[in-house]
């Protein structure tokens, strides 16, 4: 384990740095990575962001995203950068299985590994961690890392502020979730004063749907939503044919599960999607219903109490059935 003072000493000199984040990066994964990227570059380091997969097109406007290396598309170069890195920052995940095919390269790398994350149960691959599972977003922890731990608010540029704002905004569902404390609002206010143009960020993220995406949403609301009133649960089951029909691309299903949760009285919502090679689940809940426990116990996944994900290699109909068969076990929390 490394102390903060050791890390500060290391970062006082120019380092070769790789930043990585989880498979299918979301707004927080990209926002925290890009925020840290611009800060480290501003302090003279050689920095590359390498992500394990593509990410949603509604993030393509983010400052510096065109520099991001997508591992499967540029494996040889990425492997070289990882191998010769002095420091690897792992953002918004704490278990190396979440970076899929990048796992061996990162695990075997000799670099010092710094984890900044807000998910439960860290695996323990890191040499230094800034970890808090009560944080609303990893971008909040990156803000704290730069501004408080490194006392470097003076170096927070509009690019950094924009990236971190995006991470906090997306991971809090636009400042709606229980994780949105007064402290979060104070940080967000500071980011606006540091140059994040909040209204423009909301435009980029929420007013950038394709016609197909909206029609897919309409189709799911009309034909794929199932409400189970006796367990205050609602779910969407989306087939691989549905994805083909509407030409669904990465990010198009983002936020869909929240529509199931928005039905009055619903306390648990699931989005179950047949992604051909595996069935992916996204769970959301209200109150004490532990989505992460359900995902970890039954669907090889994890996450937070009120938002978690998992997967299965069984056919989608079986996954839907097993999800429904779990509900009676949580009866006391659901009704
Ligand atoms: P989403 O449903 O949006 O994919 O993910 C919700 C939350 O659960 C996110 O914080 C995400 O990092 C986490 N999560 C999603 N899928 C998995 C998974 O397969 N394993 C683990 N450990 N966490 C996941
Ligand atoms: Mn996050």
Image: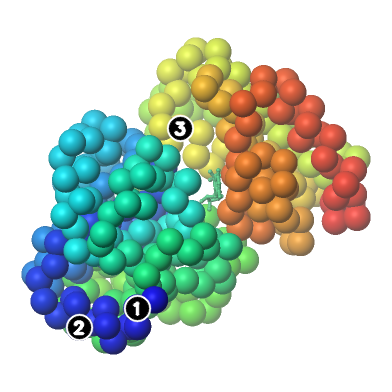
Residue density around tag 2, few if under 14, some if 14–19, many if 20 or more, within 10 Å: few
Please tell me whether mark 3 sits on a helix, a strand or a loop: loop
Q: Nearer the viewer, mark 2 or mark 1?
A: 1
Measured Cα–Cα span from mark 2 to mark 1: 11 Å
Q: Nearer the viewer, mark 3 or mark 2?
A: 2
When the figure is inspected, residue 324 is found, relative to residue 43, above or below; the finding is above
Q: Which of the two residues, 79 or 293, is positioned nearer the viewer here?
A: 79
Rendered position, 120 above or below 79: below
- Is 322 situated above or below 258? above
**Which SS class for mark 1?**
loop
Q: Which label's residue is closer to the chain start, 3 or 2?
A: 2
- Which residue is under mark 2? 9
What residue is rendered at 57% in x and 37% in y? 256
Tell me, for residue 2, which label it has, or none.
1
Mark 3 closeness class: few <14, some 14–19, many ≥20 residues within 10 Å: many
Side of 251 where 196 appears, left or right:
left
Q: Which mark is residue 252?
A: 3
Instruction: Give the CA separation, mark 1 to mark 3.
Output: 40 Å
Label pair 1/3, CB-CB below 8 angstroms: no
Q: Who's the residue at 43% across and 79% down the image?
A: 186
Residue 281: tell me if it is visible. Answer: yes
Q: How far across and how far down the image is residue 220, in percent? A: 61, 25
């Amino acid at each position: 384990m490394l102390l903060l003072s050791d890390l500060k000493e290391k970062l006082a000199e120019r380092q070769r740095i790789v930043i990585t984040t989880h498979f299918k990066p979301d707004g927080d994964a990209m926002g925290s990575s890009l925020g840290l990227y611009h800060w480290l570059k501003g302090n003279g380091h050689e920095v590359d962001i390498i992500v394990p997969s593509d990410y949603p097109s509604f993030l393509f406007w983010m400052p510096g995203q065109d520099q991001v290396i997508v591992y499967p598309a540029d494996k040889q170069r990425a492997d070289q950068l990882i191998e010769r890195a002095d420091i690897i920052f792992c953002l918004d995940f704490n278990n190396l299985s979440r970076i899929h095919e990048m796992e061996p390269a990162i695990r075997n790398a000799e670099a010092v590994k710094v984890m900044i994350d807000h998910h439960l149960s860290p695996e323990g691959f890191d040499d230094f961690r800034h970890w808090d599972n009560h944080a609303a977003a990893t971008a909040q922890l990156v803000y704290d890392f730069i501004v408080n731990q490194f006392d470097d608010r003076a170096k927070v540029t509009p690019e950094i502020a924009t990236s971190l704002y995006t991470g906090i905004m997306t991971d809090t569902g636009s400042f709606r979730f229980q994780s949105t404390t007064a402290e979060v609002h104070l940080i967000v206010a500071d980011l606006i004063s540091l140059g994040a143009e909040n209204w423009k960020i909301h435009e980029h993220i929420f007013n950038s749907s394709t016609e197909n995406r909206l029609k897919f949403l309409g189709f799911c609301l009309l034909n794929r939503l199932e409400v189970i009133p006796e367990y205050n649960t609602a779910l969407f089951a989306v087939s691989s044919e549905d994805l083909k029909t509407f030409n669904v691309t990465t990010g198009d299903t983002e936020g869909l599960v929240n529509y199931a949760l928005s039905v009055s009285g619903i306390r648990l919502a699931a989005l179950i999607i047949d992604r051909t090679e595996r069935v992916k689940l996204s769970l959301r809940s209200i109150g004490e219903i532990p989505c992460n426990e359900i995902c970890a116990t039954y669907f090889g996944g994890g996450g937070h109490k009120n938002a978690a994900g998992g997967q299965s290699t069984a056919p989608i109909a079986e996954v839907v059935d097993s999800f429904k068969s779990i509900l009676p076990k949580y009866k006391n929390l659901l009704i």
